[in-house]
């Protein structure tokens, strides 16, 4: 069973060079936090995913971390959980319509309100309640070409 984490990878790869660098992660975090990126968090995310230690996370490394499902890499789930926490601006454990809309905008994707509603429904949520962490993983695992 293969999962497609390409949409999530592309969001984090802000300069679109095919690999995620610390600068890409800084740019991603800057879209959600006025205080900027937490360098310790970025360092731990990179070390958890950069298995060949070249300073970058290639797609296969990214996929291995997200697809491992706890196969010995206990910190791997933490990467996406950290991303979720950053997106969840009000800290209620759900991504609201506005949380997702600002995320898509910061990532450079033009998403209409209808697109956001469709994503929330795809993730098993509803437009009033938002979507959970598990729902975000469902959304990101589906290749949206639109």
Image (cartoon, grey):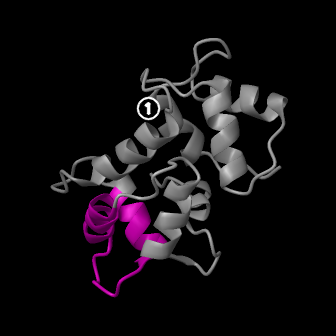
Q: Residues within 10 Å of mark 1 (few under 14, many from 20)?
A: some
Count of all numbered marks drawn on residues in the image = 1
- Which SS does the magenta portion mostly show? helix
The one nearer the camera, 59 or 92, is: 92
Residue occupying the point 46% across, 57% down: 36
Is 125 left, or right, of 75 in this rendering? right
Could you say where residue 100 lies in the image, as x and y percent from the top left? 64, 36
Is residue 5 in view from this perspective? no
Name of the residue lying farthest toward the top: 128
Q: Position of residue 72 (x, y in %)?
A: 15, 55
Residue drawn at (42%, 59%), measured in percent from left and top? 37
Please state the horizontal and vertical placement of residue 32, each as a whole percent of the image: 54, 47
- Quarter residue 4 falls in: bottom right
Which type of secondary structure does the marked residue at label 1 adopt? helix
Taking depth in this image into account, of 47 and 121 the one nearest to the observer is: 47
* Magenta-colored stretch includes residue 43: yes
Write down the quadrant of residue 18 in the picture: bottom right
| Front-most of residues 14 and 50 | 14
Residue pictured at 51% horizontal, 39% vertical: 87
- On screen, 88 above or below 79? above
Residue 55 versus residue 134 in the image, above or below: below
**Residue extending furthest toward the front:** 35
Which stretch appears magenta?
39-65
Confirm whether the magenta stretch covers residue 142. Answer: no
Residue 14 spot, x, y in % from top left: 61, 68
* Front-most of residues 13 and 35: 35
- Tell me the residue that label 1 is attached to: 133
């Amino acid at each position: 069973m293969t999962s497609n984490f390409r949409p999530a990878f592309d969001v984090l790869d802000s300069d679109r060079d095919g690999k995620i660098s610390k600068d890409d992660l800084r740019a991603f975090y800057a879209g959600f936090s006025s205080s900027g990126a937490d360098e310790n968090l970025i360092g731990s995310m990179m070390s958890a995913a950069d298995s060949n230690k070249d300073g970058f996370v290639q797609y296969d490394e990214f996929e291995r971390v997200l697809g491992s499902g706890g196969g010995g890499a206990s910190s791997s789930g933490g990467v996406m959980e950290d991303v979720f926490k950053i997106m969840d601006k009000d800290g209620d454990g759900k991504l609201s319509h506005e949380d997702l809309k600002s995320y898509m905008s910061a990532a450079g994707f033009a998403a209409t309100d209808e697109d956001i509603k469709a994503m929330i429904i795809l993730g098993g949520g509803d437009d009033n309640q938002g979507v959970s962490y598990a729902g975000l993983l469902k959304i990101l695992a589906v290749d949206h070409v639109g």
